[in-house]
């Protein structure tokens, strides 16, 4: 095991990797509950989506652990599942089977992009300052997720400035964030969790992050935030029902309601292709942003790894292998019956717990497999227990900002837009888009247009097209 995963070379041990893998799993286990809920709103059988979520996560996470030997985990992506359900199915009127067909095509496009080295060219074309901004921006993004999950924020919107879209409220820019009144038990438990996590992290306990999850969960149970009903706990989300329902989703993308009707209307060809493009852009850039941002700030991907990728052929470098592994899960997930599968930024929770190799990923995948049998027990772990982890880890990643020359507006403006839009726009891809587009404007205005690499132009134009399509849709 030490020889295969190079544990000593990476300064880690089996026990540390196990703890890190478990920590990563708990930090992202919410997807097991959220993904079926979102996709289930389209009419998809919820239990089948639950099992498809597990299977896609296992395939992707094992692949990246064994192929690239890096401590990342994959699962159906948040945001992409909402786009799948609320835009593609509910708004545009496609069947969920047709949406799965689009996801499968997106996966194939992702494979072509990776094999053609376009992804590599994109990474190598990102300026140093933007790479650092992406790292810090992901830190903002992660911490914001944690603060939101902790329930510490509330949002106030003016009357008449929001719409109800199939149960999802969309408010305009009049919405104002603020702190909640600290009279909610769940919020108080989350604050206790933050303090507990700070204690364990600052004291540098090896299993500190995992212990903070356990301690906060116990506090949540004792305070009634988590209520355990033994009569119903083990009758929900059972594996037998999930297996039976998967017969409805497995391969549905290729059935008469999937590919059979997706291209049946010539008037919708452009709309279908633009929708696939919207899926593909996020699938391509979310992992790139995650690898660059978290990898550089944590040391998982060093400057030497990026240099090795620049001179490598095929899939020989560490980054090449990670990108290769990432492309596998989306088409497989679509076959099982779930939306796009991607690298999870919550993986940094396990990295923060000491994970340095693919063994962390394998442990996370094993936890996903076990969860298929003990899902009711996982529902005991509340978001108040995992939110503090994301806040602390996000804080750690802000160190990337120190490498940006903020006194030089030519660097500062694209870095600002990339990092702020990543966090407040709740999307790694949107942050990259904002950074690339403003970078082009900066270079044009400074008369340095020749410094803009072709890949930056292409990516920026594709994002502009994507935004225009979404505006029309």
Image: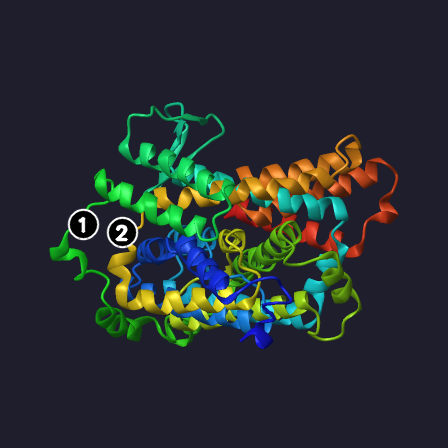
Nearer the observer, 329 or 9: 9
Find residue 87 and report its horizontal and vertical position in percent: 43, 51
Q: Is residue 330 visible?
A: no
Q: Is residue 40 above or below residue 400?
A: below
Is 225 on the left or on the right of 72, as rendered?
Answer: left
Helix, strand or loop at disc 2?
Answer: loop
Measure the C-alpha gap from mark 1 to mark 2: 7 Å
Q: For mark 1, give the secondary structure.
A: loop
At x 49%, y 43%, the residue is 201
**Front residue of this view, candidates 320 and 351:** 351
Q: Is residue 372 above or below residue 293?
A: below
Residue of label 2: 380
Q: Position of residue 192 (x, y in %)?
A: 36, 35
The label number, if any, that marks residue 228 in the structure image: 1
- Pointers 1 and 2 in contact (C-beta within 8 Å): yes
Horizontal placement of 140 versus 448: left or right? left
Residue 226 in view in this figure: yes
Q: Give me the residue at 45% from left, 63% from top.
A: 18
**Residue 314, horizontal then vertical, whole percent:** 72, 75
Residue neighbourhood size for the residue with mark 1, other residues' Cα within 10 Å, grouped as few (<14), some (14–19), many (≥20): some
Marker count (numbered): 2
Where does the image place residue 317, in percent across and percent down from the top left?
Answer: 70, 70
Quadrant of residue 39 within the rendered picture: bottom left
Point 33% across, 64% down: residue: 49
Name the foreground residue: 240 vs 398.
398
């Amino acid at each position: 095991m030490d020889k295969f995963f190079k544990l000593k070379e990476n300064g880690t041990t089996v026990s540390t990797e196990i703890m890190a893998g478990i920590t990563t799993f708990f930090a992202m286990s919410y997807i097991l509950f959220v993904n079926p809920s979102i996709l289930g709103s389209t009419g998809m059988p919820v239990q089948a989506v639950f099992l498809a979520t597990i299977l896609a996560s296992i395939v992707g996470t094992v692949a990246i652990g064994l192929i690239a030997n890096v401590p990342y985990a994959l699962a159906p992506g948040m945001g992409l599942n909402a786009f799948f359900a609320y835009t593609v199915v509910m708004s545009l009127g496609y069947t969920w089977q047709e949406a799965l067909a689009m996801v499968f095509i997106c996966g194939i496009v992702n494979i072509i992009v990776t094999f053609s080295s376009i992804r590599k060219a994109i990474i190598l074309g990102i300026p140093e300052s933007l790479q650092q901004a992406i790292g810090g921006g992901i830190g903002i993004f992660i911490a914001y997720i944690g603060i939101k999950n902790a329930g510490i924020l509330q949002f106030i919107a003016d009357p008449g400035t929001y719409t109800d879209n199939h149960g999802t409220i969309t408010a305009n820019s009049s919405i104002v964030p603020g702190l909640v009144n600290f009279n909610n038990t769940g919020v108080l438990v989350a604050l206790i969790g933050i303090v507990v996590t700070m204690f364990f992290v600052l004291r540098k306990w090896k299993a500190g992050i995992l212990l903070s999850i356990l301690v906060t969960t116990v506090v949540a149970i004792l305070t009634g935030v988590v209520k355990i009903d033994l009569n119903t706990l083990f009758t929900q989300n059972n594996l037998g029902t999930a297996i039976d329902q998967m017969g409805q989703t497995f391969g549905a993308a290729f059935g008469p309601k999937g590919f059979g009707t997706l291209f049946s209307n010539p008037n919708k060809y452009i709309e279908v292709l633009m929708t696939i493009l919207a899926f593909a852009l996020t699938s391509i850039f979310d992992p790139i942003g995650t690898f660059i941002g978290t990898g550089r700030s944590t040391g998982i991907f060093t400057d030497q790894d990026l240099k090795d990728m620049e001179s490598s052929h095929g899939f020989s470098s560490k980054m090449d292998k990670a990108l290769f592994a990432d492309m596998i899960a989306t088409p497989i997930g679509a076959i099982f019956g779930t939306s796009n599968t991607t690298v999870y930024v919550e993986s940094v929770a396990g990295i923060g717990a000491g994970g340095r190799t693919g063994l962390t990923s394998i442990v996370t995948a094993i936890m996903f497999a076990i969860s298929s049998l003990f899902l009711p027990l996982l529902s005991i772990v509340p978001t108040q227990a995992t939110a503090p982890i994301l806040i602390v880890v996000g804080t750690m990643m802000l160190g990337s900002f120190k490498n940006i020359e903020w006194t030089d507006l030519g660097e500062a403006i694209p870095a600002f837009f990339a990092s702020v839009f990543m966090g407040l726009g709740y999307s790694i891809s949107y942050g990259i888009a904002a950074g690339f587009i403003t970078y082009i404007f900066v270079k044009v205005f400074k008369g340095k247009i020749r410094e803009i690499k072709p890949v930056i132009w292409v990516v920026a134009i594709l994002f502009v097209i994507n935004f225009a399509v979404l505006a029309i849709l």
